[in-house]
Amino acid sequence: MYKNTNCFHLAIPCGDLEVAKKFYSETLGCRLDNSAQEWADVDFWGNELTLHKSEHKLDNERHDVDMGNVSVPHFGVHLSRKDFDALKQRLKNSGTKYTRNKNFNSKPRVKILISG
């Protein structure tokens, strides 16, 4: 399932698993695996992101970084320009709000915020 041989694995609480699966698969275009259980594995651009159904909300704080004031914790992925443009169009088509780095450089970044 994962195209990287040195992929990372990150497991996070996601609240409503069905809502999260729909967002990652339909909005972001990620493939799902093991999605009939209490968790779902997401092929997050070659890395394994595991979403766990949870009632618990993550603590949330804000930090000033190069992209502005961001929620912590968060994670992201570096994409090629082609993949970034395709994802940006998917987000626009679905009406999903996103933030673009005003200091955009040659390595497009998409940050998915995981906050309560």
Image (spheres, rainbow, N blue to C red):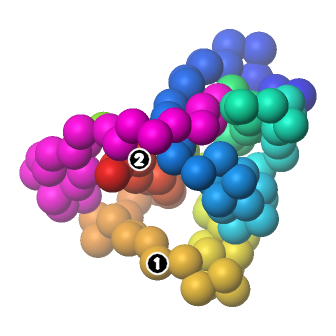
Task: Look at the picture and state if 66 lies above or below 89.
Answer: above
Left or right of 30, for residue 49 = left
> Is 71 covered by the magenta stretch?
yes
Furthest-left residue in this view: 64
Marks counted in the figure total 2
Residue placed at 80% from the left, 31% from the top? 37
Label 2 and label 1: CA atoms lie apart by 14 Å
Residue placed at 60% from the left, 32% from the top? 52
Q: Nearer the viewer, mark 2 or mark 1?
A: 2
Q: Residues within 10 Å of mark 2 (few under 14, many from 20)?
A: some
Left or right of 103, for residue 92 = right
| x and y, in percent, of residue 82 in the image | 71, 63
Q: Which stretch appears magenta?
A: 49-72
> Is 62 covered by the magenta stretch?
yes
Residue placed at 15% from the left, 45% from the top? 61
**Under tag 1, what secondary structure?**
loop
Type of amino acid under label 2: Ile
Q: Main secondary structure of the magenta part?
A: strand
**Under tag 2, what secondary structure?**
loop
Q: Residues within 10 Å of mark 1 (few under 14, many from 20)?
A: few
The mark nearer the N terminus, 2 or 1, is 1
* Residue 47 in view of the camera: no
Quadrant placement of the N terminus: top right
Q: Which residue is mark 2?
A: 114
Task: Look at the picture and state if 13 lies above or below 63.
Answer: above
Which corner quadrant of the image does residue 85 belong to?
bottom right
| x and y, in percent, of residue 65 in the image | 16, 49
Type of amino acid under label 1: Lys
| x and y, in percent, of residue 58 in the image | 32, 39
* Residue 37 in view of the camera: yes
